Amino acid sequence: MSNKNYSNYLPEDFAADAYFQKWVLEDDPMANIFWEKWLADQHPEKQAEVELAKILIHQFRFKDHQATEDDFNDVWKHIKGSQIDEFKSAKRTKNARYVISAAASIIILVAFTLLFNQNRDKPVFDPVVVTNKINPGKDKATLTLEDGTEVELEKNQVFKTKNAQSNGKELVYKPGETTSPEIAYNYLTIPRGGQFNLTLTDGTKIWLNSESQLKYPILFTEGTTRKVELIYGEAYFDVSPSTDHKGSSFKVVNGAQEVEVLGTEFNIKAYKDENFIYTTLVEGKVVVNTANNQETLAPNQQLKLNVSNNDITLFTSTDTFRETAWKNGVFSFKNKPLKDIMKVLARWYDIHVVFASKSLETITFNGSLKKQLSIEEILSIISNTSTISYEITDKTIILKEHT
């Protein structure tokens, strides 16, 4: 039993406290009673800080590393001074779970970075790098205009039409509507190793991930449903509400499903080489229509659609921050098999990945990593927390078990 006054403790203080660690790591009966009563009866407002402290403790349980109080303080100093875009974005949302998850992800990111830097001079193995022609992805896209003309959009390159303009990072269409029944469409295609942002004429903002394509009208018809098509890939939508457009709803069509919204934020992942479409709701409400089902999603819910048989699975407690961290410059993985992780990395770094042994594909990994890290930095972090070594030749990576 502890006699300390924990009422003013911050996450780093809880994480460094021996009695708190006893509760988190040892499942001590007396500690369980004390902390559960302290939270439930005395300080329920401390729930978020306690949860973050738990995550902080678990993330420092690395092999051959014993965390010190200075470690915890160092991490939290980085968190509080963080200029990471996704945490700023998370703080603007009304979804409290999203905010906690964002902060937790930054804890994991910073913890990995600090520990990686501490052990930088002590590699587990010597990687083989014959030639490395791999660079992180960047802002780039191909815009296909209504007459079929293709325009390459890249960073620091300005492009203008009568309807839109781009600074090489985002494409913004002028506000407006049309009464014409004839609709002209543009296509925005994001290659492997790319990403791009788009603002439609109704004010809807869209983030497009690597290897994605979106079809959309250059002007929406007044009084009708606003409809776009995610032909393939992944996109995050922040939809302008129907109340700003005389009640016009917004629909996203993709192959085997149609998502209808009134004004909300959600993510759709529908890659050509995957057998599932994932629709994840961050805020608001959406209705997902498939061949056999209609499902209404609430915040923090995710619908998984099997495109081969139209079966659906509804997850009612989804970590929405991890699902959408990509749009804010972070890879975030939780219990993800290495095969799935490398598929994500392959799209961003435009690489080919070979597993020397099939058993390596199922090794799971937890962590959050900045997308602007070099591929060698990411592979080193993965390998230093596992038994995996790697070889790089041009744009091919071979993963093998370290012996």
Image (cartoon, helix red, strand yellow):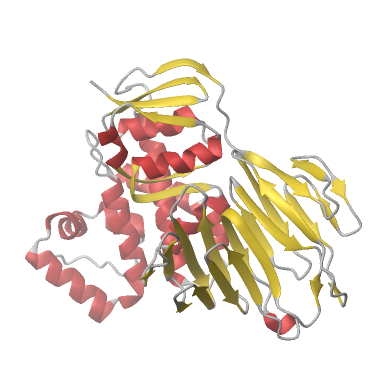
Front residue of 99 and 125: 125
In the rendered image, the residue lying farthest to the top is 130
Front residue of 396 and 82: 396
Give the image location of residue 227, x and y in percent. 69, 70
Is residue 64 depicted above or below 85 in this figure? above
> On the rendered image, what quadrant is the C terminus found in?
top left
Residue 32 location, quadrant: bottom left
Identify the residue at image location x=19%, y=69%. 35
Residue 252 visible, this orientation: yes
Give the image location of residue 364, x and y in percent. 29, 44
Is residue 78 depicted above or below 124 in this figure? below
Is residue 209 depicted above or below 30 in this figure? above
329 sits to left or right of 35: right
Residue 74 visible, this orientation: no
In the rendered image, the residue lying farthest to the right is 162
Identify the residue at image location x=58%, y=53%. 232
Give the image location of residue 10, x and y in percent. 36, 61
How many marks overall? 0
142 sits to left or right of 126: right
Front residue of 207 and 79: 207
> On the rendered image, what quadrant is the N terminus found in?
bottom left
Is residue 316 depicted above or below 326 in this figure? below
Residue 349 location, quadrant: top right
Give the image location of residue 325, x and y in percent. 50, 54
Identify the residue at image location x=46%, y=61%. 278
